[in-house]
Image (tube, rainbow, N blue to C red):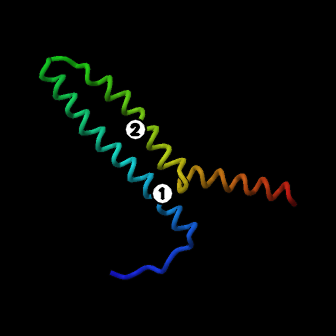
Amino acid sequence: MSRQPPLDPELERLAQQRANAKLGWYRHAAIYVIVNLGLFSLAFHQGRDWAIYPALGWGLGLAIHGVAVWLHGPDGRWRERLVARERQALQRRHD
């Protein structure tokens, strides 16, 4: 295993923050699947279909969490485009 050269402390902090955000979403998704499988199993054995409601509500929360991590997070492409656009606007105003 090769050792990587030490990163700039700010880059290291950002890398840790990104990794933690993504791991948090993976954990959230895994718990969502496990719990909802249990709820669907329980509802199926009762002969009812109520389990779809918590799955949909929680699924919306999981989707919003995913958008926050993958699109709006520090490495999201959407955020990068906004930062570039703001940078250009500030540069034009400064010139």
- Position of 71 with respect to 30 (left or right) is right
Asked if 66 appears above or below 87 in the picture, the reply is: above
Q: Residue at x 43, y 55 (%)?
A: 20
Q: Quadrant of the C terminus?
A: bottom right
**What amino acid type should be assigned to the residue bearing mark 2?**
Leu
Q: Residue at x 83, y 56 (%)?
A: 92
In the rendered image, residue 29, in percent from the top left (x then y), is placed at 33, 43
Q: Looking at this view, is 77 or 32 the one in front?
A: 32
Quick one: label 1 or label 2, which is nearer the N terminus? 1
In the rendered image, residue 71, in percent from the top left (x then y), is placed at 51, 48
Read off the residue under disc 1. Answer: 18
Q: Looking at this view, is 87 or 24 the one in front?
A: 24
Q: Residue at x 19, y 17 (%)?
A: 48
Read off the residue under disc 2. Answer: 62
Asked if 50 appears above or below 21 in the picture, the reply is: above
**What amino acid type should be assigned to the residue bearing mark 1?**
Arg
- Position of 89 with respect to 23 (left or right) is right
- Position of 32 with respect to 7 (left or right) is left
In the rendered image, residue 40, in percent from the top left (x then y), is placed at 21, 28
| Marks 1 and 2 close (CB-CB < 8 Å) | no
